[in-house]
Image (cartoon, rainbow, N blue to C red):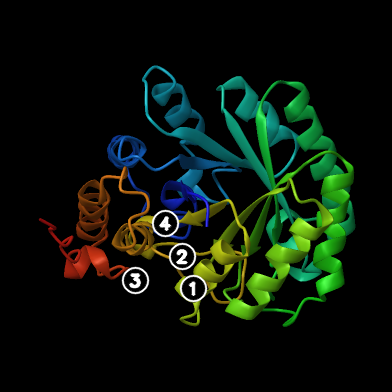
Amino acid sequence: MNQILIHEVGPRDGLQVEAAVVPTELKLDWIRRVADSGVDIVQVGSFVRGDKVPQMADTDDLFRLLAKESHRALLSGLVLNEKGLERALEVGVSLICMGVSASETHSRKNTGMGTEEAQRRIITTALAAKQAGRKVQVSVQSAFGCGFEGPIPEERVLGIVAAYLEAGLSAISLADTAGHSHPDQVRRYVRKVLELDPAAEVTAHIHNTYGLGMASVYAAMEAGARAIETSFGGLGGCPFTKVAAGNVATEDLVHGLQRTGQRTDIDLAALVGVSRDVARHLGRELPGCVYKTGPIAAKVTA
């Protein structure tokens, strides 16, 4: 495997389903610490309606404040439509993420549009973001299954990927929104995307709803995925899917990588510290493991 990139999505995917809104200053503290830990990308928030997703109501403010600072990580933001892109461009988001759900039901619940209409609009919006000089990542949500519809036909997923590639959008995330993926499926899908375009930059976004999250992440990396999206403490879940459950924990993945000599540039202790603070603030244990157990000490060699 080449060095895998870590895209921390805790401030967005991790917090979006929480009922009690986290104060902006506390979010800023968590984002700053993760962004300076050595991970590659941090997703600050999503440009959605605050009345629909209250945790994301301060996304514009977060970016304005963070734009005044210097961080090791690239900062990303999620947009769902043209209005969201306008807001993202206005506050200077460097990496703009957007996507289409392969599930018709999830697409309508999440965006108010069916898959076909959402695909047309997202491709147009993504091209506008590129024209504005921004980096763009497009995703296929519910790529591995849907809590409402069950299995999603593979050809539907690859059809969306092919449409992205035809439009010149080659940074593609395969998102396991409902957590239905299993390692063989993830491995196969990543390889099929790379067969369509060997130069594609594939990201895997895996939820751990049914306990196969880390196994699926490793399958994605072995198949050639360039980046993995994870969340501090394993927090998160889509509020518009049937069973919202957390992501693979960032510190768990980094711990596993470091045990084999990879990504030793990332400050694992800093990530663990953030997850412990998040758990303390929320008043409950998070799904992640390493922030509770502590890491296994590295072997000292003579």
As shown in the figure, which amino acid type bears the numbered disc 2?
Asn
Residue 191 picture location, percent across and down = 72, 65
Q: Nearer the viewer, mark 1 or mark 3?
A: 1
Residue 291 picture location, percent across and down = 23, 63
Residue on which disc 1 sits: 213
Q: Dot 4, crowdedness within 10 Å: few (<14), some or many (≥20)? A: many
Question: What residue appears at the point 83 percent right and 47 percent down from the top-left corner?
Answer: 165
Furthest residue in direction front, as rendered: 302
Mark 1 to mark 4: distance in Å? 12 Å
Q: Dot 1, crowdedness within 10 Å: few (<14), some or many (≥20)? A: many
Q: Dot 3, crowdedness within 10 Å: few (<14), some or many (≥20)? A: many
Task: Tell me which numbered mark, 2 or 4, is placed earlier along the sequence.
Answer: 4
Residue on which disc 4 sits: 231
As shown in the figure, which amino acid type bears the numbered disc 3?
Pro
Furthest residue in direction left, as rendered: 302
Mark 1 to mark 3: distance in Å? 11 Å
Q: Nearer the viewer, mark 1 or mark 4?
A: 1
**Is residue 277 something that shows in the picture?**
yes
- The kind of secondary structure element at disc 3 is loop
Residue 75 picture location, percent across and down = 49, 34
Q: Which mark is residue 247?
A: 2
State the residue in front, 248 or 29: 248
Direction from residue 61 to residue 181 in the image, left or right: right
Residue on which disc 3 sits: 287
State the residue in front, 199 or 293: 199
Question: What residue appears at the point 49 percent right and 42 percent down from the top-left corner?
Answer: 43
- The kind of secondary structure element at disc 2 is loop
As shown in the figure, which amino acid type bears the numbered disc 4?
Ser
Mark 2 to mark 4: distance in Å? 6 Å
- The kind of secondary structure element at disc 4 is loop
Query: Image height check: is 21 above or below 238?
Result: above
C-beta proximity under 8 Å, tags 1 and 2: yes
